[in-house]
Image: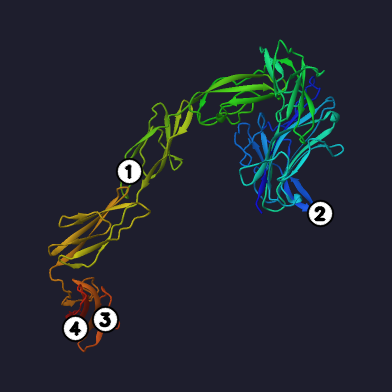
């Protein structure tokens, strides 16, 4: 059966105090993940199974597991691969969490946050947004991937209506759309609002749980994002210093909005998510209610309030301008204020662009102006400040005179130089400081890796690495088809050169008649008889050169040659007897007989020789008969015979 996937749930929880616009209540610490961590959150993992026909998730507190509890920065602009919606919740300046992943393995993940609504906050609303990602293998309902979002009254362990959901993967889920990827369906962003007026002073627990199918093939995951303000006001409802206009914005994702001029609800001002205000027509102190209507089946009808106030802009502090080393970091800004949020640009050159005092990254090359926008979360007012960081960039350019590859026994003559005449340098070989090399130049005495620590205006950096290397020397060698060859017949020279490693080698064959060749193996036809010298010159890719030399005799009469005598006395001279088969194609048999006609030696292998022994014992001085049978170049079998004298 084909697979079907139900896609992603991004949840945005925004705590807003209803009718409590005169109260000041910040969100519980790090409920919005503003520290870029899971502090105060409980991260859980576990497994899912079917017990008694019910889908059962077993979770334990394991702490953050990066592939199952993943923080997503507000600067992230990537889309979910299945639903093509933003991975980070739109219109939110706080971090998003991806809960779970698209791997299989009947895994389950959870996030839990517990807090108490202040007892003096007698009117409180909870708002969150979601979308969902679940794969649909079309198992039975209790076996499917699913997502659960619950808000629980801890005191009596009851779920709060309108905001608690349990989605089991199904192609029949209302509000879901088909994706273009692998038979996927998904639900886009949806907002949920619930009145928590009756829960002042009570403990509340937020729970988010994702789970795969109960087998090992299909996944489920979610995105979670918590708003940063819980003080009972719709964010941005103040006239800030010097402003005569402001804009109030209701949470997005609802089906309808209805703004009213006052709490009598007698005059409607607008039906859009945003409402533009002017100081003359809407003075400070005005309270504007907005009725938000959710999509059918996704939350409760609710009324939110925006109290229009006047507020000072925060004192945004980027810090003093500084000059610093390019290879070091410098801290900007000032100590954070709890009710402020921060946003720095350019963010890609800072350790974290959303804290009050980030560090610059290592490697600034040009003077850079950093701007911080500081927003008061209680008033919505913002101000900016800037700081310029001027890096000292050490000139690390360097040069080399001489070569970097040396052949064996060759004396090093390379000179390494730092080009920065306004700096000092210390040289290192193989990462160990070289004693007495505190100048801008270095003359290496042995091979190795060389580099310089360069100091300029109190800043240090390193030069490039110079690797002086001893190149391998080729070992040239070659063989000749026969040591005596025929006039006007091709003589084959086979290259036997070796070299360490994969170093390339080029070749030059030089013949004493003045001719040459650059082939790997070569052959040559000699036009005159005589003894010729052949030299093979081997040159490595690093210009290391060696050569070897041999001779070949070219004869006019191309008959097999046998000596008239030999002296097997182990002096290295004329110790063996063998035929030299000039003009022959191949040896058929070479046999030696003693004076009584006994065979003392016989071979069919060309090049084999008689060493003057018979059955392991030295033969005495005397005359012996030899017979050579060979295949001529015309393929005829030719037999020759003669005598040889063994002398001891």
Query: Disc number at residue 625?
Result: 4
Occupied quadrant, residue 517:
bottom left
- Cβ atoms under marks 4 and 3 closer than 8 Å: no
Q: Position of residue 643 (x, y in %)?
A: 16, 81
> On the rendered structure, is 194 left or right of 134?
right
Q: Nearer the viewer, mark 2 or mark 4?
A: 2
Q: CA distance from mark 1 to mark 4?
A: 63 Å
Q: What residue is shown with label 3?
A: 602
- Cβ atoms under marks 2 and 4 closer than 8 Å: no
Q: Nearer the viewer, residue 322 or 237?
A: 237
Mark 2 vs 4, N-terminal side: 2
Q: Residues within 10 Å of mark 1 (few under 14, many from 20)?
A: some
Q: Residues within 10 Å of mark 2 (few under 14, many from 20)?
A: few
Q: Position of residue 465 (x, y in %)?
A: 42, 39
Q: CA distance from mark 4 to mark 3?
A: 12 Å
> On the rendered structure, is 421 left or right of 103?
left
- Cβ atoms under marks 3 and 1 closer than 8 Å: no
Mark 3 vs 2, N-terminal side: 2
Q: Nearer the viewer, mark 3 or mark 1?
A: 3
Mark 1 vs 4, N-terminal side: 1
Q: Nearer the viewer, mark 3 or mark 2?
A: 2
Q: Residues within 10 Å of mark 4 (few under 14, many from 20)?
A: some
> On the rendered structure, is 553 left or right of 52?
left
What secondary structure is marked by label 1? loop
Q: Position of residue 262 (x, y in %)?
A: 79, 17
Q: What residue is shown with label 1?
A: 412
What secondary structure is marked by label 2? loop
> On the rendered structure, is 289 left or right of 34?
right
């Amino acid at each position: 059966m084909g697979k079907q996937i139900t896609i992603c749930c991004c949840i945005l929880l925004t705590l807003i105090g209803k009718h409590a616009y005169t109260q000041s209540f910040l969100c519980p610490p790090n409920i919005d993940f503003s520290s870029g961590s899971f502090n105060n959150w409980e991260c859980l993992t576990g497994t899912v199974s079917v017990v008694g026909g019910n889908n059962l998730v077993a979770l334990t507190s394991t702490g953050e597991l990066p592939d199952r509890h993943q923080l997503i920065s507000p600067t992230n602009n990537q889309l979910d691969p299945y639903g093509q919606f933003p991975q980070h919740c739109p219109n939110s300046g706080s971090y998003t969490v991806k809960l779970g992943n698209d791997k299989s393995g009947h895994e389950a993940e959870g996030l839990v946050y517990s807090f108490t609504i202040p007892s003096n906050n007698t009117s409180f609303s909870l708002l969150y947004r979601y979308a969902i990602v679940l794969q649909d293998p079309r198992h039975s309902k209790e076996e499917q991937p699913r997502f659960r979002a619950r808000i629980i009254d801890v005191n009596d362990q009851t779920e709060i209506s309108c905001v608690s959901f349990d989605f089991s993967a199904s192609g029949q889920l209302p509000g879901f759309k088909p994706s273009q990827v692998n038979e996927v369906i998904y639900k886009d962003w949806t907002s949920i609002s619930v009145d928590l007026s009756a829960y002042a002073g009570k403990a509340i627990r937020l729970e988010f749980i994702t789970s795969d199918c109960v087998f090992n093939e299909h996944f489920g995951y979610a995105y979670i994002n918590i708003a940063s303000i819980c003080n009972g006001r719709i964010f941005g409802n103040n006239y800030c210093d010097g402003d005569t206009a402001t804009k109030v914005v209701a949470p997005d994702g609802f089906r309808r909005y209805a703004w009213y001029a006052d709490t009598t609800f007698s005059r409607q001002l607008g039906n859009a998510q945003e409402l533009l205000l002017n100081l003359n027509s809407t003075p400070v102190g005005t309270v504007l209610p907005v009725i938000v209507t959710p999509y059918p089946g996704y939350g409760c009808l609710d009324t939110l309030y925006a109290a229009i106030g006047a507020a000072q802009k925060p004192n945004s502090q980027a810090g003093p301008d500084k000059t610093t080393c390019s290879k070091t970091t410098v801290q900007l800004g000032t100590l954070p204020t709890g009710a402020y949020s921060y946003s720095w640009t350019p963010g890609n050159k800072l350790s974290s662009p959303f804290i009050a005092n980030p560090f610059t990254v290592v490697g600034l090359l040009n003077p850079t102006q950093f701007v911080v926008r500081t927003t008061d979360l209680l008033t919505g007012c913002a101000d900016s400040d800037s700081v310029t960081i001027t890096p000292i960039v050490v000139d690390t350019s360097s040069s080399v005179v001489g070569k970097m590859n040396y052949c064996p026994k060759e004396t090093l003559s390379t000179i390494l130089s730092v080009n920065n005449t306004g700096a000092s340098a210390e040289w290192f070989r193989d990462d160990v400081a070289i004693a007495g090399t505190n100048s801008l130049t270095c003359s290496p005495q042995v091979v190795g890796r060389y580099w310089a620590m360069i100091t300029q205006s109190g800043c240090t950096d390193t030069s490039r690495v110079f690797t002086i290397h001893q190149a391998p020397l080729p070992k040239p060698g070659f063989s000749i088809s026969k040591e005596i060859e025929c006039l006007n017949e091709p003589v084959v020279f086979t290259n036997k050169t070796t070299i360490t490693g994969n170093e390339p080698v080029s070749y030059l064959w030089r013949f004493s008649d003045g001719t040459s060749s650059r082939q790997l193996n070569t052959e040559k036809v000699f036009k005159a008889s005589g003894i010729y010298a052949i030299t093979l010159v081997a040159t490595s890719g690093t210009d290391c050169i060696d050569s070897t030399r041999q001779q070949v005799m070219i004869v006019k009469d191309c008959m097999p040659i046998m000596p008239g005598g030999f002296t097997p006395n182990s002096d290295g001279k004329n110790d063996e007897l063998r035929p030299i088969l000039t003009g022959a194609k191949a040896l058929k048999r070479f046999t030696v007989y003693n004076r009584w006609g006994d065979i003392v030696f016989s071979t069919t292998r060309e090049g084999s020789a008689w060493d003057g022994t018979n059955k392991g014992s030295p033969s005495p001085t005397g005359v012996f008969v030899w017979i050579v049978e060979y295949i001529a170049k015309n393929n005829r079998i030719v037999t020759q015979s003669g005598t040889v004298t063994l002398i001891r």
